[in-house]
Image (spheres, helix red, strand yellow):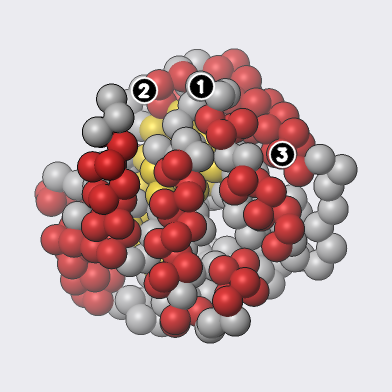
C-alpha cells in the first residue's frame, strides 16, 4: 500500500504533494513502482495534529481519487469522517482506512450500505492531538487484540462481512517505543483473529528512536520493519518507499517459496 498524503503537515511528506496535480503525479509514480493499493489521505494524523473541516478534506482527496480510479489500482481513503467516507465510496474508493475503527456516529452504517467496499479498523489510544502524551497499557498485545475483536464484532453486527475487513494495530498511535516493539514482535497473535493485518511502520518516529535518523533518512529501518511485519503475519504493509519495499519483500517471498 503506497502512501499519498495530500496535506501540508503530515509527519514525513507534508506539503510535498499538497496540490491535486502533485498528488496525482506522485500516486502514478507509486503505481509504476509496484503499489498494489494506494492510500490517499487529506488530514494529517501525526501526533499533535489537529482535525481539518469536512469540506477541506473533501476538496483535497476527491479530485485525486476521481483522477486515479481509472488506473485500475484499488484506492483506499484514509479518513475517520463519515461524510468523507460517503463521497469517497461514491467516487469509487475500494477501501476505507479508518484510524478510529468506524467509531464515529454513522460510519459503520455508511460502510455497511456499500457491500463491495473494504474497511481497515485501526487501534488508537486517545486522539492524534493527545495520543502520545502518556500512553499506558497493562498488556499491550491483549488490549489491542481485544479492541480489534470488539470492532470486528461491531462491523459484523451491521452486516459488514468478514471478507471485507482488515485490521491494523496502529503502530505509533498512542504507544511508546516499547509498546510498538512488543506489538511488532507479537504481531502473529493478531493475525490469528482471522482478518488480514495491515502494518504501517514506514518512516515512523519509533524507527528514528532506534537509529537516531531523522524522518527523511529512515528507508533502511522502514524496509526492515516492513519485512519483520510480513514475517510475523502482516498481509498489507503501508509504505512511502514502494519500490525498495517491494524488492526487499520479493527476496523474502522467493526464499520462503523454497520451503513449500
CA gap, disc 2 to disc 3? 31 Å
User: Would you name the residue on which mark 3 appears?
Assistant: 141
Q: Which residue is mark 2?
A: 115
Q: CA distance from mark 3 to mark 1?
A: 16 Å
First in sequence: mark 1 vs mark 2: 2
Tell me the residue that label 1 is attached to. 194
Instruction: Determine whether the residue tagged by mark 2 lies in a helix, strand or loop.
Output: loop
x 53%, y 75%: residue: 11
Horizontal side of 15 relative to 244 (left or right) equals right
Q: Earlier in the sequence, mark 2 or mark 3?
A: 2
Please tell me which residue is depicted at 42% across the width and 77% down the height of the picture. Answer: 13
Identify the mark nearer the N-term, 3 or 1.
3
Q: From the image, state whether disc 2 or disc 3 is nearer to you.
A: 3
Q: Say few, some or many: other residues with alpha carbon within 10 Å of mark 1 (under 14 / 14 to 19 / 20 or more).
A: few
The one nearer the camera, 137 or 74, is: 137
Q: Circle 1 — which element?
A: loop
Q: Position of residue 115 (x, y in %)?
A: 36, 22
Who is closer to the viewer here, 80 or 203?
Answer: 203
> Looking at the rendering, which quadrant does residue 2 occupy?
bottom left
Q: Nearer the viewer, residue 19 or 196?
A: 196
1 or 2: mark nearer the eye: 1
Q: Is the C terminus in the top left, top right, bottom left or bottom right quadrant?
A: top left
Amino acid at each position: 500500500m503506497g502512501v499519498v498524503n495530500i496535506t501540508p503537515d503530515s509527519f514525513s511528506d507534508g506539503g510535498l504533494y499538497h496540490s491535486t496535480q502533485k498528488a496525482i503525479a506522485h500516486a502514478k509514480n507509486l503505481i509504476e513502482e509496484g503499489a498494489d493499493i494506494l492510500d490517499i489521505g487529506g488530514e494529517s494524523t501525526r501526533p499533535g495534529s489537529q482535525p481539518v473541516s469536512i469540506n477541506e478534506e473533501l476538496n483535497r482527496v476527491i479530485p485525486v481519487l476521481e483522477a486515479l480510479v481509472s488506473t485500475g489500482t484499488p484506492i483506499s481513503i484514509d479518513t475517520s469522517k463519515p461524510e468523507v467516507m460517503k463521497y469517497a465510496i461514491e467516487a469509487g474508493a475500494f477501501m476505507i482506512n479508518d484510524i478510529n475503527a468506524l467509531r464515529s456516529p454513522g460510519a459503520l452504517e455508511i460502510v455497511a450500505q456499500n457491500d463491495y467496499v473494504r474497511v481497515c479498523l485501526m487501534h488508537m489510544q486517545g486522539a492524534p492531538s493527545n495520543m502520545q502524551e502518556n500512553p499506558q497499557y497493562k498488556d499491550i498485545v491483549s488490549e489491542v487484540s481485544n479492541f480489534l475483536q470488539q470492532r470486528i464484532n461491531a462491523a459484523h453486527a451491521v452486516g459488514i462481512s468478514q471478507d471485507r475487513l482488515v485490521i491494523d494495530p496502529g503502530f505509533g498511535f498512542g504507544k511508546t517505543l516499547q509498546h510498538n516493539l512488543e506489538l511488532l514482535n507479537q504481531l502473529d497473535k493478531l493475525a490469528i483473529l482471522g482478518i488480514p493485518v495491515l502494518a504501517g511502520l514506514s518512516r515512523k518516529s519509533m524507527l528514528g528512536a532506534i537509529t537516531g535518523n531523522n524522518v527523511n533518512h529512515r528507508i533502511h529501518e522502514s524496509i526492515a520493519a516492513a519485512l519483520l511485519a510480513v514475517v510475523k503475519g502482516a498481509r498489507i504493509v503501508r509504505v512511502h518507499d514502494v519500490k525498495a519495499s517491494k524488492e526487499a519483500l520479493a527476496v523474502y517471498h522467493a526464499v520462503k517459496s523454497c520451503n513449500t
